[in-house]
Image (spheres, rainbow, N blue to C red):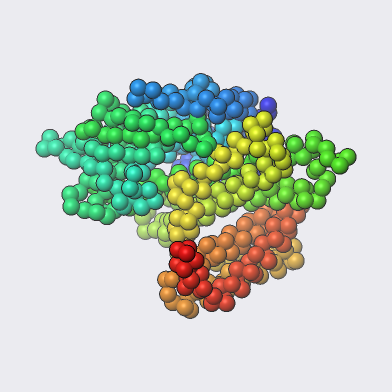
Amino acid sequence: MSNFYNDNQDIIFHMENMDLRRIVELKEDNFTDSKTCRYSPLDYEDTRDNYKKLLEIMGDITGNYIAPRATEVDQLGATYKDGEVAYAQGTKEAIDILKKADLMGMTLPRKYEGLNLPKTIYSMCIEMVSRADASLMNLVGLQDIADTICKFGSEDQKARYLPRFARGEVMGAMALTEPDAGSDLQAVMLKATQNPDGNWYLNGVKRFITNGCADVSLVLARSEDKTTDGRGLSLFVYERDKNMTIRRIEHKLGIHGSPTCEIQFNNARCELLGTRRMGLIKYTMSLMNGARLGIAAQSLGIAEAAYREALKYAKERNQFKKKILNFTAVYEMLTDMKIGLEASRTLLYETSKIVDIKEGLEERMEKYPERKSDLRDEISKYTKLAGLFTPLAKAHNAEIGNKICYDAIQIHGGVGYTTEFSVERHARDQRITNIYEGTTQMQIVAAIGGITSGLVSERLNEYENDNDFTKMPDLFKSLQELRTNLELAVSHIKKRNDNLSIEFHARRLTEMALYTVNSYLLSIAGLKNDRKKQIAKIYTSKALPDSRSRLEFISSNDYSIVELHEGIINH
């Protein structure tokens, strides 16, 4: 195999060209850890060098140790017997390798034995893990559980749980979904009751819980009697004991190495995380936003693996006395796949940087409360941007990733539909990414407010102010048309002044926003690299007609689907 960092020139391009100074400044807080921790960096350049070395280590592990085990993990899967779940042997070995490399607490602070990585570098790591074995990401990526405890837990909870996560002694799960509460988490009814002695206990069932066999879970439960909405929910830390039963695991289309469990709590003792009533509206939303960023990286990693398989096959397969790569229909598909990957990666890293700055500012304000007034405006700005870009990245990368995997099978032809090649596994693994942690439709609901409020336009202003697009006037002209189309569409919808119009056109508006943002981001990269400029040109040339058609449909005021759908569906 190969090193999954060193063989990916696009990740290296981003790593070499992205400005991480603000993120490092916030994350390292003047490098105060260097006084007490021997592996803490001393300055900005030292920090970047540490990041690169860690990415090379992760690239080696994922390429040479995890990826070779992935087919067998898929075939064997996680198993269930007598109330217990067992990982596939390859999964156990992969986790053990990551433990020995001290990669199980990547984003945790060094005081809890973590590596203090920003989300931007973590996203790169998660992409590589997912390229190697998508199901393993569902276990390794649950480091978000530890992050949530770190962010909202008491000092005692942090001290008891976080070092164990960092050492790989415990694995995590987030127990949110129930049989009657999927996308609508306000409907959660699992009960949390507090005894007179102050202890909390859980009773009820959770379903579709990734790694539900974990040692430590964050459980969303109804703590307030006679409530039925999100304000009656709290979040609890639960460490597995005999009072939680694993009832079964799901038999799934893909990600077989990741057990998806149905679990039952029978008066299981737990601990309140943070304060009551904030479980859904604050803590779970923070947890899920982190998970959504992880899924954006996961879908990208799977798509990267599928693209490479398709390219290799197209270079080797002969038909009609020539390589199929030389057929226009095939090389256009592969070109679109490659550009889709690089657009997804650029959006992922942009989103990760926004989240890093938001979280870094929040940590600084908590540490230095006297600076609250100085930081308030910047925190507000990046909170809004994170609220917009996180669902955009999750929706975009999952949808593009599914298309790339679909096309990878198509390029393979009939053998792509067999288990002889890995593309069928990648397609099966990819299919869940636009479903779990919030379907694409739910991501659009989350993003549309930022689009209609003009937040996208504000960000585009920053891109234009910070970059000299006059160096490529033809491309900038296309960027401006994309932006104008989006703003005209938003203006048209707002003039109608009704929720139905926004709801009906939400996906079209979101797609227009993505065409525009991605075109700007790829063009910014094009200012640094001629190849990236070519990618921006092709991406934008294909985005323009799609943007125009959506504007035309929105402006037509054609609501026939709204008016006629019942007669069509119910006939």
Image height of 427 relative to 420, above or below: below
Residue at the limit of the structure toward the left, as seen here? 196
Image height of 226 relative to 479, above or below: above
Give me the residue at 69% from left, 44% from top.
Answer: 410
Is 345 on the left-hand or right-hand side of 356? right
Residue at the limit of the structure toward the right, as seen here? 321
Note whether residue 106 is visible.
no
Image height of 92 relative to 161, above or below: above
Give me the residue at 68% from left, 37% from top.
Answer: 416
Give me the residue at 49% from left, 66% from top.
Answer: 568
Measured as percent of width and height from the top left, residue 529 is found at 73, 50
Splitting the image into 4 quarters, where does residue 442 fall?
bottom left
Q: Nearer the viewer, residue 471 or 199?
A: 199
Q: What is the count of numbered marks?
A: 0
Q: Indicate the quadrant containing the N terminus: top left, top right, bottom left or bottom right.
A: top right
Splitting the image into 4 quarters, where does residue 523 fall?
bottom right
Image height of 66 relative to 260, above or below: above
Is 14 on the left-hand or right-hand side of 534? left
Measured as percent of width and height from the top left, residue 210 is found at 42, 36
